[in-house]
Amino acid sequence: DAQVEPDPSKKTLVILGTGWGSVSLLKRLDTENYNVIVISPRNYFLFTPLLPSCTNGTIEHRSIMEPIRTILRQKKARVKFYEAEASSIDPDRKVVRLTDTSEIRGDTTETEVPYDMLVVGVGAENATFGIPGVREHSCFLKEIGDAQKIRKRIMDCVETAAFKDQSLDEIDRLLHMVVVGGGPTGVEFAGELQDFFEEDIKKLVPDISARFKVTLIEALPSVLPMFSKQLIEYTESTFKEEKINIHTKTMVKKVTDKTVEAEVTRPDGAKETVVFPYGLLVWATGNSVRPVVQDLMSRIPAQANSRRGLAVNEYLVVQGTRDIWAVGDCAVAGYAPTAQVAGQEGNFLARLFNNMAKTEAIEAKIRELSSSLNLQPGNSAAVSREIEQYERQLRRLKDAKPFKYSHQGSLAYIGSEKAVADVTWFNGNLAAAGSLTFLFWRSAYLSMCFSSRNRLLVINDWLKAKVFGRDLSRE
Ligand code: FAD
Ligand code: NAD
């Protein structure tokens, strides 16, 4: 290794991923206690709650990215970062195999990193349920590249629909934006799409704009199932006003390059197949397990019954392992896969690891004092008092409470400057919706942005879009 050697007196802590879970851990971790190594194919943290706003240019993508090296530079002790994918984890040999999957590669593209302690925070993949055509023809909305691809495609559809001599049927198809999945990702994206259309496309491409249509398809009887009933109704009625077509009880079964085929359950229970021609298809049906996690689970007998990710105990230790913890969307701790949960789990692990290091330091101190007690019996009363003090500190540290998630509420933007919020308020629940909630949504997300640089850029983007309109150039 051409770089600085790890300190042999410290344990090596390897952290996989640079998302909500891992970065929250890094933010609070006292890096002086360990040789910390971060491995992720993405050299930045991404503030996902504003990702849907990047699909139409309300927010520019770099405003919600924070370089991991900037984050690591602020740590007291040096942290190593390798831009690579963890391709496999061997819990017996305690090594992580990593592969450089970026465009530019050196002579070494694969190697191993040994660990004493490992945190898996690799997130999840997009679920497709093996439905044919999804991977080939649709856009996902998880990473920054997905949002950029969608932004390009929306404008490509509009410009292609405006092409000379395009038939009306083809214009209708090209301007039909179909979103599959009525969870918060699908709903927020549909809202952003409608805003783009109402506020910008309509003005700038007026001749064909009447044919622009957004359809949201959901297999369950309603969208946003995690929100309270009144907010679901509010969202559905707002979408109706905005002319977003919602098709619930509609399960997509097949996707081709130009159509989506779905099975609709009618009120009498009868099933019928419907075909939706589309110009842009966005697939937002939730999460599935990443291959590296699947592989690790297959090596641990205690994980045999876990389907949705690494089952962890109340201290976030991966069940059936020692020295491996998991956070965020790849961990199954009994909570929803959200940034809020991942962030709190990361904070919890930082506290746990800081305490573990303190515990070890105190244990060493007690050992040292106890041996001095034997060597210098004259001082015994004072030393015994000191030992007792350390033992009290030790008991407090060892009395660490297990992880408990504290739900602050759910928020979602639904378009036309309206949002829905289910928030916890003085031990009760408060459901709110509308324009004021939208302002709350904006201020809440602004305060959650990673850095003041991000915050400033986001405010700038909001102002820019308001004053000058969104940018329709197709990069
Ligand atoms: P991620 O944040 O996805 O990070 C995973 C990290 O692991 C990434 O850095 C990735 O590059 C890296 N990685 C992947 N594979 C490997 C590998 N093999 N080896 C090493 N590293 C790897 N939640 C909310 O609470 N509120 C919201 O408003 C909200 N809005 C959202 C909007 C969108 C569009 C999306 C997609 C999600 C939203 N979520 C929201 C959910 C939230 O983003 C996730 O729950 C959260 O990102 C999970 O954090 P994580 O650290 O587990 O994973
Ligand atoms: P999700 O799992 O919440 O929703 C996916 C939806 O797709 C489900 O309602 C499901 O019934 C539907 N679906 C699945 N297969 C289908 C098919 N073949 N045809 C039609 N519909 C189908 O997924 P998400 O919206 O991507 O959210 C993922 C996680 O991220 C969740 O935990 C969510 O809470 C979180 N998130 C939160 C926010 C927010 O708080 N504002 C925003 C985005 C995501």
Image (cartoon, grey):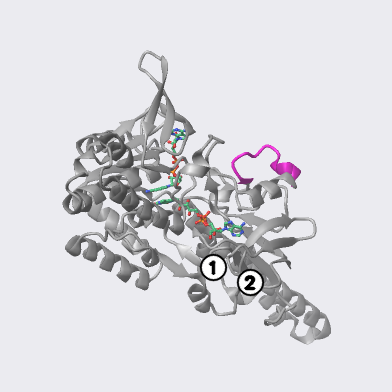
Boundaries of the magenta span:
300-310
Q: Locate residue 369 relative to residue 141 in the image: left or right.
A: right
The single residue placed furthest to the front in the displayed view is 165
Q: Nearer the viewer, residue 457 or 406?
A: 457
Q: Nearer the viewer, residue 2 or 175?
A: 175
Q: Residues within 10 Å of mark 1 (few under 14, many from 20)?
A: many
Identify which residue is drawn at 25% across, 41% down: 212
Q: Secondary structure at mark 2?
A: strand
Q: Which residue is mark 2?
A: 36
Residue 436 place in picture, x, y as percent: 20, 51
User: Magenta segment: does it hold 474?
Assistant: no
Q: Locate residue 284 relative to residue 163 in the image: left or right.
A: right
Q: Which residue is mark 1?
A: 26
Predominant SS of the magenta segment:
loop
Residue 416 place in picture, x, y as percent: 22, 47
Kind of residue indicated by mark 2: Val
Above or below, comparing residue 371 to residue 339 in the picture: below
